[in-house]
Image (tube, grey):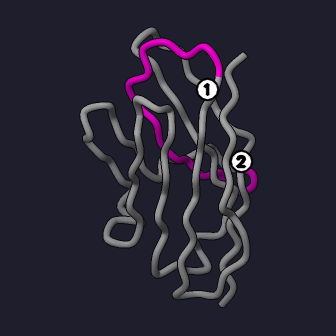
Amino acid sequence: QVQLVESGGGLVQAGGSLRLSCAASGNILGVNVMGWYRQPPGKQRALVATITTGGSTNYADSVKGRFTISGLITKNTVYLQMNSLKPEDTDVYYCYLGSIYGMEYWGKGTLVTVSS
């Protein structure tokens, strides 16, 4: 059984920083991408950032220059360094893992709250 476990969410003041971590366990074959998504209440899950096994990264425009994704995809681990946080960054953040076989896995989410 595949599990993705996130940690690092919490409450921070605007302008502060948080670091999210995600570790995946279980029988996962052909991992080729890991990343982070967010889901505002009543809306669809949206991309925050992804990183591939080759090291290519992709960011939502709203977080470019403030957030940095990193990780050891071969170790099924990914991080999200979040700097210069804004109240509009408040959301539940979900860890994502995708494989070359079309399998997708999600964590249960970690809440990030940014106060003004």
Q: Nearer the viewer, residue 87 or 28?
A: 28
**How many discs appear?**
2
- Give SS at disc 2: loop
Image-based side of 31 in relation to 114, left or right? left
Image-based side of 55 in relation to 12, left or right? left
Query: Residue 69 placed where, x, y %?
Result: 40, 54
Query: Residue 80 placed where, x, y %?
Result: 48, 57
* Type of amino acid at the residue the image marks with label 1: Tyr
* Type of amino acid at the residue the image marks with label 2: Gly
Quadrant housing residue 89: bottom right
- Give SS at disc 1: strand
Q: Please say whether residue 66 is one of the residues in the magenta stretch.
A: no
Q: Please say whether residue 40 is one of the residues in the magenta stretch.
A: yes
Pointer 1 residue: 105
Residue at 42% over, 14% down: 30
Above or below residue 15? Residue 76 is above
Q: Nearer the viewer, residue 58 or 27?
A: 27
Pointer 2 residue: 109
Image-based side of 2 in relation to 73, left or right? right
Quadrant housing residue 101: top left
Query: Residue 63 placed where, x, y %?
Result: 41, 66
Residue at 60% over, 52% down: 38
Above or below residue 61? Residue 46 is above
- Identify the magenta region: 26-42
